[in-house]
Amino acid sequence: MFQTADMLKTFQRYRSNTIVIPGRGSRHWVNISTTPKRDVPLGDPAMGGHASFAFGLALAQPDEKIVLFDSEGDLLMNLGVLPTIAEQGPKNFYHFLLDNECYATTGGQPVPNASNIAYDVIARGAGYPHTFAFDNLEDLSNNIEAILNLPGPVFVAMKVVPEIENEPIGRRSRWQTRSRDQVLKELQEELGIAAR
């Protein structure tokens, strides 16, 4: 297992001009990213919503590389998104899964059978052409550039250290520096899309 923040720092070195949906890694990503106008930190749209949003963005912007940092808790709420993504086959979609084996944002309840789930195998079975699994940051670091050069959709499962939050949601430190409307407006401007 490795720290989410350390993995995001590694990814940042290879990010290039990628659009990033930081998902559950958002609270770290806001301090690591060097291109915030190409970041789409949505907070918590709904459990299971990050993959569908990122997939839709990949379809809408086929000339832009889209990277999602999802969580296993999110993905388990919407496993049906995997075969849908695989069937559509967006060549620009990179699905990174942060697997901490628990529901950390709601107090650390364990994910059932967490240590035995092979999310890369599930994604491969759903039809993703390229899947990987890492529990060692050095191995990920040695492979991330090659992974990001593959055509999508790509799925990367990563075992990360849980960062359990027991503070009630309303009393947690706010990491978001921009409103959802501001995030979307800045991304539209960055991509040259007229706002509706």
Image (spheres, rainbow, N blue to C red):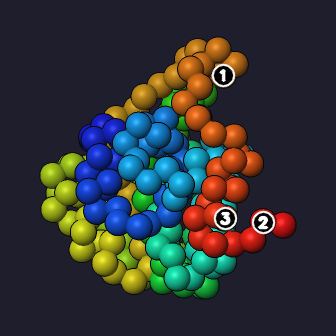
For label 3, the residue is: 188
Contact? badges 3 and 2 (CB < 8 Å): yes
Q: Residue at x 21, y 49 (%)?
A: 137
For label 1, the residue is: 169
Residue lying farthest to the right in this orientation: 196
Q: Secondary structure at mark 1?
A: helix
Q: CA distance from mark 1 to mark 2?
A: 32 Å
Q: Is residue 187 left or right of residue 196?
A: left
For label 2, the residue is: 195
Q: Indicate the quadrant where residue 3 lies.
A: top left
Q: CA distance from mark 3 to mark 2?
A: 7 Å
Dividing the image into 4 quarters, which one contains the N terminus?
top left
Q: Secondary structure at mark 3?
A: helix
> Residue flagged by tag 3: what amino acid is it?
Gln
> Residue flagged by tag 2: what amino acid is it?
Ala
Q: Residue at x 59, y 35 (%)?
A: 176
Q: Residue at x 63, y 39 (%)?
A: 178
Which class describes the residues within 10 Å of circle 2: few (<14), some (14-19), or many (20+)? Answer: few
> Residue flagged by tag 1: what amino acid is it?
Ile
Above or below, 126 against 14 in this view is below
Q: Is residue 159 left or right of residue 68?
A: left
Q: Residue at x 24, y 69 (%)?
A: 145
